[in-house]
Image (cartoon, rainbow, N blue to C red):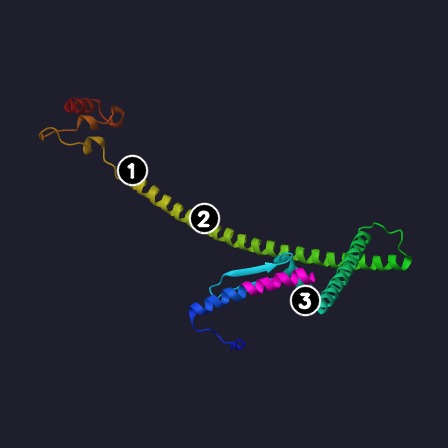
Amino acid sequence: MGRGRVELKRIENKINRQVTFSKRRNGLLKKAYELSILCDAEVALIVFSSRGKLYEFGSVGTNKTLERYQRCCYNPQDANISDRETQGWYQEVSKLKAKYESLQRSQRHLLGEDLGPLSVKELQQLERQLEVALSKARQRKTQIMMEQMEELRKKERQLGDINKQLKNKLETEGAFRGLQGSWESGAVVGNNTFSLHPSQSGPMDCEPTLQIGYHPHFVPPEAAIPRTIAGESNFIQGWVL
């Protein structure tokens, strides 16, 4: 009797499962090798075990076969989309390049360069552009000058206010100093008026004595004594002495 048909399902026994994997893996690798030799086919086989171990076979190399597989699986529609995008970018670059060249020509014309190829109409248009640009530049310059003048006027007013405050402060201080000087001069005059004689201001070094007649320091000169009678004048002088 022949061998019975094996039911295809996961083998629950771990040892039996490992033995079956080893036998069938070797048979699969052998069949791949035979297929590549007998039929001159490019065969690549990759097997991972349940434990993550790698087994591979490639008739011309696994990596080479995988690269060929990727090239064959590349979608032609993706290639068409890429070509259309490339064409769109190329057109955009061409437009930007033409615009850049046009702007460069306009700049040279505004600077007065390369005016030979221009026609009369183009020259008139260029002249109008320059006049408009000059008018706008003058308006902007006038506006800036007016703003600067207004700022200077504002600073002038501020400085005038500060100058006025300083002037008032100086006038107030000058009046106060003049009043103070008048007070000091009045005090000096009063002191000179009520000053005592040096002989009276000093302390008394001796005991008080009785003095009959004039004090020697206060004897009036002879010219100040009236001479009515010669004898009386001599008598007075003797009495004083």
Q: Earlier in the sequence, mark 3 or mark 2?
A: 3
- How crowded pointer 3 is (Cα within 10 Å; few <14, some 14-19, many 20+) is rated as few
Quadrant position of residue 126: bottom right
Q: Earlier in the sequence, mark 3 or mark 1?
A: 3
**Is 223 in front, or is 145?**
145
Quick one: SS at disc 1? helix
How many numbered marks appear? 3
**Is 33 in front, or is 167?**
33
Magenta: predominant secondary structure element?
helix
Callout 1 touching callout 2 (CB < 8 Å): no
Specify the segment rendered in magenta. Answer: 26-44
Q: Circle 2 is placed at which residue position?
A: 170
Q: Circle 1 is placed at which residue position?
A: 192
Q: Is residue 85 left or right of residue 234?
A: right
At 67% across and 66% down in the image, what residue appears? 73
State which mark lies toward you, 3 or 1. Answer: 3
167 to 85, vertically: above or below:
above
Q: Is residue 224 left or right of residue 3?
A: left
Quadrant position of residue 143: bottom right
At 46% across and 66% down in the image, what residue appears? 18
**Quarter of the figure with the C terminus:** top left
Q: Amino acid at mark 3?
A: Cys
- Residue 165 belongs to magenta span: no
As drawn, the label of residue 212 is: none
Query: Which residue is at the far right?
Result: 120
Q: Is residue 164 left or right of residue 73?
A: left
* Cα distance between the residues tagged 3 and 1: 130 Å
Q: Circle 3 is placed at which residue position?
A: 73
**Is 142 in front, or is 222?**
142
User: Residue 127, percent across and down?
Assistant: 84, 57
Quick one: SS at disc 3? helix
At 65% across and 60% down in the image, what residue appears? 65
